[in-house]
Every structure is written in structure tokens, then in C-alpha cells.
Image (cartoon, rainbow, N blue to C red):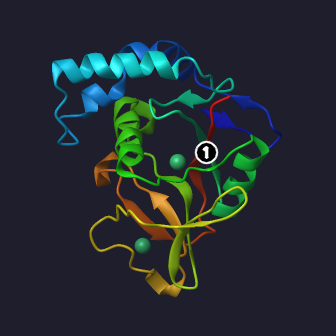
């Protein structure tokens, strides 16, 4: 998926095709063993019911629908954290805020399922203000309660790491604090419509 700086958004054909059928192959089932989750056959049926319900809502074109009722956009063009937040706002969203373990696990499962998202590092909407980690909201910010830091992080290297990077599969998608000016792909989030 590519978002160029002129507002023209194009996506690799594979993503478009996969998005069409993703509800038939919900990645959480494949990712569950990796994540240490057990999916009972009955629960799987329940998930399918949930997916049916989620289908009643829609995400805008080119956004991914999650079973949790949110929409996500994976943007491969590299941007600073502030640029990324601004680009998400242009699309009616925010940089993804990961407010509970369900959402964290869903995103891990989704990224583990799609080859082109496995290794890539992404910005999400976490940032540090006055020593406190928060999620950047559309109108107001939320103090982080649940965290999923990589071992040894946040290490505030050089005293300048104030933004939240979601690492790739080689780091189990754990979190790292990073200088906000670094250029990374990013993940936007918005409500369904
Ligand atoms: Ca969220
Ligand atoms: Ca760090």
C-alpha cells in the first residue's frame, strides 16, 4: 500500500484482493497459536457470527475492517510521526491508538498474516508528554494504561525518544520509543461508517 504525498492512494493488487476475502480468512485464527491464544471450534463459530455483525458496518474504501469494529489503513510511505498523524487526519482518522489487549492482539495477528506487513516497522499514535505516555486522539489525548514494550524499552535513547514505534515480526510486534523525526510507514485508524 502506498500513499503518495499528493493525496493519491494506491495499493498493491495483493492487498486489494486480500481485503475482499479477508473476512473469510480472519487472521486471528491463524495467529492465535502464535499469540498463545486458544480458539475453540465453538469460539470460531462465535467469531464468524461476530464477523457477520461487523459486516453490517463498513470502512471507507482501502481501509481494513477489524472484528473489533474499527478501520485501519496501512500506509507504506515513510513519514515522521507528526507527518503521519497529519496524513491520517486528512483521511478522517488518527494514528492507531491501541487501547486494549484485544486490539493489540488483533493488529499483531493481522500483520503476521500479511506478508508485506510482517517485518515493517510502523508508527502508531503513542507519544510521550511530560514523561507520560499517551495516545493522540482526534480531539483529546488519553493516558496509556496497557503497554506492550519490547524488552529494554522504552529506553529513551539520547533522551529524545518521544514517539511510539510498532516493531515488526522479528521483534514480535512489540513497542519501542523512537525519535519522532524518524521516517517510518504508519498505521491509521478510524471508526466504521
Ligand atoms: Ca484503537
Ligand atoms: Ca527506544
Nearest to the observer: residue 17 or residue 191: 191
Q: Residues within 10 Å of mark 1 (few under 14, many from 20)?
A: many
- Residue 191 visible? The answer is yes
Q: Is residue 93 left or right of residue 180?
A: right
Extreme-right residue of the structure: 6
Quadrant where the image shows the N terminus: top right
Ligand 2 is located in which of the four quadrants?
bottom left
SS class of the residue under badge 1?
strand
Taking the image as shown, residue 129 lies to the left or right of residue 88, namely left
The one nearer the camera, 12 or 105, is 105
Residue closest to the eye, 150 or 28: 28
Image quarter where the C terminus lies is: top right
Q: Is residue 148 above or below residue 115?
A: below
- Relative height, residue 69 to residue 143 (above, below): above
Residue at position x 37%, y 22% in the image: 26
Does residue 22 appear anywhere in the picture? no
**Left or right of residue 5: residue 172:** left
- Classify residue 32 by image quadrant: top left
Whether disc 1's CB lies below 8 Å from ligand 1 is answered no
The answer to whether residue 62 is above or below residue 142 is above
User: What residue sits 35% from the left and 50% below the top?
Assistant: 101
Task: Give the residue number, with chain letter if any, for mark 1.
Answer: 188
Counting from the top left corner in percent of width and height, residue 79 is at: 66, 55
Tell me residue 167's x, y (percent).
Answer: 40, 55
Measuring from the top left, give residue 19's x and y in whole percent: 52, 19
Amino acid at each position: 500500500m502506498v500513499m503518495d504525498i499528493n493525496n493519491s492512494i494506491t495499493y498493491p493488487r495483493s492487498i486489494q484482493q486480500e481485503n475482499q476475502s479477508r473476512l473469510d480468512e480472519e487472521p486471528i485464527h491463524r495467529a492465535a497459536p502464535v499469540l498463545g491464544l486458544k480458539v475453540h471450534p465453538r469460539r470460531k463459530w462465535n467469531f464468524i457470527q461476530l464477523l457477520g455483525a461487523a459486516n453490517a458496518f463498513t470502512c471507507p474504501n482501502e481501509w481494513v475492517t477489524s472484528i473489533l469494529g474499527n478501520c485501519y489503513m496501512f500506509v507504506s510511505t515513510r513519514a515522521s510521526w507528526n507527518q503521519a498523524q497529519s496524513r491520517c487526519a486528512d483521511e478522517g482518522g488518527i494514528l492507531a491508538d491501541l487501547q486494549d489487549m484485544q486490539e493489540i492482539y488483533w493488529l499483531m495477528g493481522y500483520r503476521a498474516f500479511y506478508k508485506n506487513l510482517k517485518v515493517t516497522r510502523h508508527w502508531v499514535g503513542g507519544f510521550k508528554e511530560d514523561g507520560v505516555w499517551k495516545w493522540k486522539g482526534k480531539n483529546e489525548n488519553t493516558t496509556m494504561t496497557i503497554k506492550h514494550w519490547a524488552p529494554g524499552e522504552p529506553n529513551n535513547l539520547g533522551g529524545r525518544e518521544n514517539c511510539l514505534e510498532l516493531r515488526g515480526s522479528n521483534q514480535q510486534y512489540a513497542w519501542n520509543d523512537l525519535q519522532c523525526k524518524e521516517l517510518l510507514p504508519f498505521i491509521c485508524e478510524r471508526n466504521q461508517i
